Image: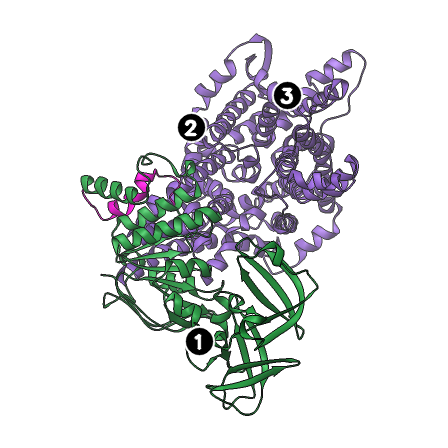
Chain colours: A green, B purple
Amino acid sequence: MGAIRIVNLEKHFGEVKALSNINLDIEKGEFFTLLGPSGCGKTTLLRTIAGFYHQDKGDIYIDNQLINNVPAYQRNTGMVFQNYAVFPHMTVFDNVAYGLRVRKMPKEAIARKVAAALKSVHLEGYEERTPDKLSGGQQQRVGLARAMAIEPRVLLFDEPLSNLDAKLRIEMRDEIRAVQKSLGITSVYVTHDQEEALVISDRIAVMNQGVIQQIGKPWEIYTNPQNTFVAYFVGKINMLTMRLEEGSEGGLRRAVKGSLSLVIPAEGTEDLEEVVVAFRPEDVVEASATGRKNEITGSLQTVSFMGSVARFELDVEGQTITVDRHRPREADMPQKGSAAAFAVPVESILLFNPKTGLRVGKGALR
Amino acid sequence: MSARSRRADIWSLVIFAGFAIVVVFLIYPLFDIFRYSFMDKESGALSLSNWVAFFSKKYYLRAFGNSMFIALATTFFSMVLGIPLAFFTTRYRIRGTNLLNTLSVLALLSPTFIGAYSWITMLGRNGFLRLMFKSIGISLPDIYGPLGIILADTLQYYPFISLMTAGALMTIDRSLEEASENLGARSTRIFFDITLPMVLPSVTGGALIVFMMSLSNFGTPMIIGGNYLVLPTLAYNLYTSEMSEMPGMASTVSIILMLCASVVIILQQWVSSRRKYASMLVNRPVVKQLKGPKSLLAHLLCYFIVFMSTLPLAVIVFFSFRNTSGPVFREGFSLNSYRQIFFDVPKTVTNSFIYSLIAVLLIATVGTLLGFVIARKRTAAVKVLDPLLMIPYMVPGTVLGIGFIVVFNRPPIFLAGTSVIIIMTYFIRRLPYSVRSAASILKQIDPALEEAGINLGSPPGRTFWTITLPLMQGGIISGAIMSWVTSMNELSASILLYVGKTMTMPIKIYLSVADGYFGTASAMSTILLVVTGISMFVVNKYFNRGSETFVAA
């Protein structure tokens, strides 16, 4: 139940190409996330699956049934909306029962299913409340219960947590994940929050400008980004466009930018003159740890203490390099404006083609 | 796919019906007026003679000048009364603010001619106030003419300004004024730098509405104007005296009146489309408690303004219970006037109720459906229909009346002398308000709610019935009640269209006043006032709508 297949999907809004060449295979029971910045097409894709938009090209299958021409109300997809969309003129019970009543289910069955749905979102005893008496988090639980109650083929989440405060967001996130796993309903989840995507998903599709940039498990997306957009959007990363020096040795070669000189993997760089050298802030180490190999020096522009992490911003050749140090100690904290030296282990470096933005070479981080 | 096309058909039908209504009941009559204005009175040949006459004869130009003068003066005095009233009642603690608002809205919604007629009974040739003052040696100026029109118009329409300004004053975020104070501004400085600019769009919007209402008002100048003609009364007089097959001059005057109204409406739309500063997350402004003489002065001012606008209504109610014998008032009190109505002209009363009821049902149904189409289905056809539906805003009642009588007095659509033509007048005049309000209610309903219904398996039709309509209900009903009030009180178009058997209360009141039957007129006016009052009460009580609604609807 619930496998989704999308083939060569395209959608235009006037001149704007909202989705181009979308191909997806979402497995049964999978928690699949569409991640990207606003306007990337993720919500358009979700709404096309729900049937609120109709694609200009391509096919959508649920359980191998072509649903292109099935109207939205017959698609049996349970949607959870960004602004809850809880019917304000109905009680909690009536909200959750709505889809069941539409399906002309007998009364006892409705009562039973509503009770079960409310139980799974911890809203027992709220049946007779009206939505104006509920908090945002509770309203979203009603939205979730309502979508689950109809036992849909797939659950669709349209940024369901973005209107909640930070703490509640984490709580609900874990709850959605738990409910989804226990029911085993295939879910498509839209978010712009990369951390949320990493935590909640089985797999993620990163989207930008209507195009899927990369599909993979959270680990893959983070450690093995296939282009600069994915690397930049998921997590934080430093990127330096550097000139390649001739020659390589032992699978390594040298890239320079001004006085900065780094040893990088040679694989895939053969035909390039320049390369984008990228590394994540948490992979930067003390200069002493590499024996001053691949050293980066510069003056400290900002020093931010963030609790578990201290973040430094270093001016290197006119570019800002971010460095994170875990478990910082006050005594070790350098002064703003002072000179600092760090190093980038060669195995923490990802390379990209500066012209195409695509990955150069293979292999994930760590 | 079949479901998809069936759904499209229902809404296409609504759109088609919308176009049909516009074409038959607006474009057709208005175009005919336009045509007649270019037709020579005698020969029927294409000619500019009417237009030349309008712009060359003093008689016509004077009416134009009079109209402008009355509208400007009314607007000015309405601001003089409305702005201080709004400021005092929102910023200072004034006891009984709700009562003041209710009374001024009652004056605003009451039939326009009642105020005029009441001022005649007070300050007319034999008005009791005039006689009273005369007995102590003070001679008051003549109320007939511009003075009376401006007096009656101002005291009826100033609530547009006071309520809209009060609405804006109440939604200014307090922190803006606090920020100004924090940056070192004193209270007068704050008022001129922050408060006034924030409410200015609302004041201007209200002023333009007052101008428009006064410009197209027919009842007041007809009753109290005497020989002083304004455009609507000029058009009416021309039409009734021309009575020929070709009402050329009346048409020309109508077109000019409509053009003036259009300019004002366009200005008003432009003002209201510009950024409004009202914020949703309001830190409501503080209401200050005034002390001692200042408080007394503020109270006196507010109560005096509202008293003056309520006085004419109270006088009418009082007169309706006075003893009469035929047209003459006698000593003492009795229900003679009411008896007279219910024995002599019961049909007039039932006509008013029945026509208004039918019109309201039509208005609410058609308005809601068209409002839905305009808010939710932005097809090319709808984009054309939307502004067309707003035309009645710009058509003063007199003009619509002339248009209707001209085209529906002949085949293919013969409606003259029927109740249908009166009902259609009510319907058309009120339709844009109903469409607008339905569309704006819908804009406040998150489309995600409808999508949620559909997503849960409910077809679009069922979703409309179970989700959309219940959410719109309050707004539709309160809008319908407002339509009911305006239909009950409609005079300017129906006076051109009625025949004996389709007479309504406002027409009867006008005729009674003209014939000197003040008792009957008072009793009928009282009935209309009571209907208006009850309707207002219902809207307030059951739909929790503040006084601002009456201005917006």
Q: Is residue B327 above or below residue A254?
A: above
Question: Element under label 1?
Answer: loop
Question: Element under label 3?
Answer: loop
Between residues B502 and A87, which one lies in front from this camera angle? A87
Residue A239 appears in the figure: yes
Between residues B196 and B47, which one lies in front from this camera angle? B196
What residue range appears in magenta? A86-106
Identity of the amino acid at label 3?
Answer: Arg
Dot label at residue B350: 2
Identity of the amino acid at label 2?
Answer: Thr
CB of mark 3 within 8 Å of CB of mark 2? no
Dot 1 and dot 2 within a common chain: no
Q: Position of residue B503 (x, y in %)?
A: 48, 32
Whether the magenta-drawn stretch holds residue B138 is answered as no
Farthest right residue in view: B137
Residue identified by numbered label 3: B95
Q: Identify the residue at horizontal 40%, vertical 48% (top origin).
A: A171
Q: Chain of mark 2?
A: B
Quarter of the image for the N terminus of chain A: give it: bottom left
Quarter of the image for the C terminus of chain A: give it: bottom left
Q: Nearer the viewer, mark 1 or mark 2?
A: 1
| Whole-number angstrom distance, CA of label 1 to CA of label 3 | 71 Å
Q: Chain of mark 1?
A: A
